[in-house]
């Protein structure tokens, strides 16, 4: 089953969705017929170009603010070298990197229609994987794990993973996926629709960590 192979991490397999949910173009035209997901099944966001452009403007403004914060912390580092201060700099630098990767996905979405996140908002995610006592991830979906519930959970995990702008979000959504994935009833655990959503969620987390590079969009051809 292709989706289950993809879920297992074999995203190079023919038919596995590429990062962001869209299928990579086949190397040869003859390969197109062997892909498991048709073009109409590839992920398409519900938002339009105008909303995407507004999100990019907002995210670039936030990126500039984070750059100033990192620069300020680096300037103060020599005079305030202690573990707590170093941790502030480490977190700020990591969050700036994640934010830049998120912006890169928006730019690729705008330019080429690829790597589009399912949502443009920044949903609250007050989840501490190390809480005592442990708590379930704070999803909107009900954690029943029948077929409809598991599909809804998987889709929400996809949306939340791709919306992360901080390293803490990336880390904790990854923990949530690992915790929730084994819990569906055996009869629905291999559902293709949910498996593709979980695969796309993991791909977003990899990109935001810069473990899967976002290919820059091809430059526009100037009109003659």
Image: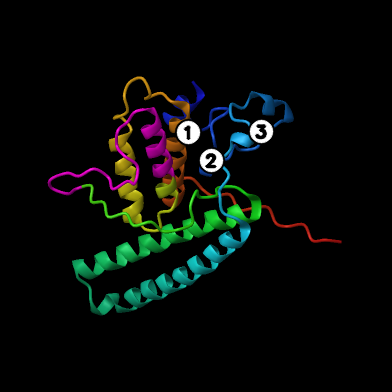
User: Does 157 appear in magenta?
Assistant: yes
Residue matched to label 2: 21
Q: Quadrant of residue 178?
A: top left
Residue matched to label 3: 26
Mark 3 vs mark 1: which is more N-terminal? 3
Mark 2 vs mark 3: which is more N-terminal? 2
The residue lying at 36 percent from left, 60 percent from top is 94
Q: Nearer the viewer, residue 219 or 152?
A: 152
Q: Position of residue 87 (x, y in %)?
A: 25, 64
Is 111 situated left or right of 10 in this image?
right
Q: Nearer the viewer, residue 125 or 94?
A: 125
Tags 1 and 2 in contact by the CB under 8 Å rule?
yes
State the SS at label 1: helix
- Residues shaded magenta: 130-158
The residue lying at 45 percent from left, 36 percent from top is 199
Tell me, for residue 93, which label it has, or none. none
User: Does 170 appear in magenta?
Assistant: no
State the SS at label 2: helix
Q: For label 2, count other residues whose C-alpha is less than 10 Å away and answer few (under 14), some (14-19) or many (20+).
A: many
Q: Position of residue 75 (x, y in %)?
A: 34, 78
Q: For label 3, count other residues whose C-alpha is less than 10 Å away and answer few (under 14), some (14-19) or many (20+).
A: some
Cα distance between the residues tagged 2 and 3: 15 Å
Residue 61 in the image: above or below residue 44: below
- Total tally of numbered discs in the picture: 3
Q: Nearer the viewer, mark 3 or mark 1?
A: 1
The residue most toward the left is 133
Tell me, for residue 196, which label it has, or none. 1
């Amino acid at each position: 089953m292709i989706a289950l192979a993809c879920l297992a991490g074999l995203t190079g397999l023919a038919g596995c969705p590429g990062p962001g949910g869209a299928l990579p173009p086949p190397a040869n035209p003859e390969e197109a017929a062997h892909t498991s997901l048709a073009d109409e099944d590839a992920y398409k966001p519900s938002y339009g170009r105008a909303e995407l452009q507004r999100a990019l403007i907002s995210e670039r403004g936030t990126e500039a603010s984070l750059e100033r914060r990192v620069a300020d912390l680096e300037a103060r580092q020599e005079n305030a070298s202690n573990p707590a201060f170093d941790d502030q700099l480490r977190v700020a630098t990591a969050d700036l990197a994640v934010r830049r990767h998120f912006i890169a996905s928006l730019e690729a979405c705008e330019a080429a229609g690829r790597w589009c996140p399912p949502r443009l908002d920044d949903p609250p995610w007050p989840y501490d994987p190390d809480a005592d006592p442990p708590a379930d991830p704070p999803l909107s979906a009900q954690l029943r794990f029948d077929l409809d519930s598991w599909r809804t959970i998987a889709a929400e995990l996809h949306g939340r993973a791709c919306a992360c702008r901080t390293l803490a979000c990336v880390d904790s959504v990854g923990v949530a996926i690992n915790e929730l994935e084994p819990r569906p009833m055996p009869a629905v655990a291999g559902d293709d629709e949910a498996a593709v959503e979980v695969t796309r969620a993991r791909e977003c987390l990899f990109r935001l960590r810069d473990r899967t590079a976002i290919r820059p969009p091809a430059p526009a051809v100037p009109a003659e």
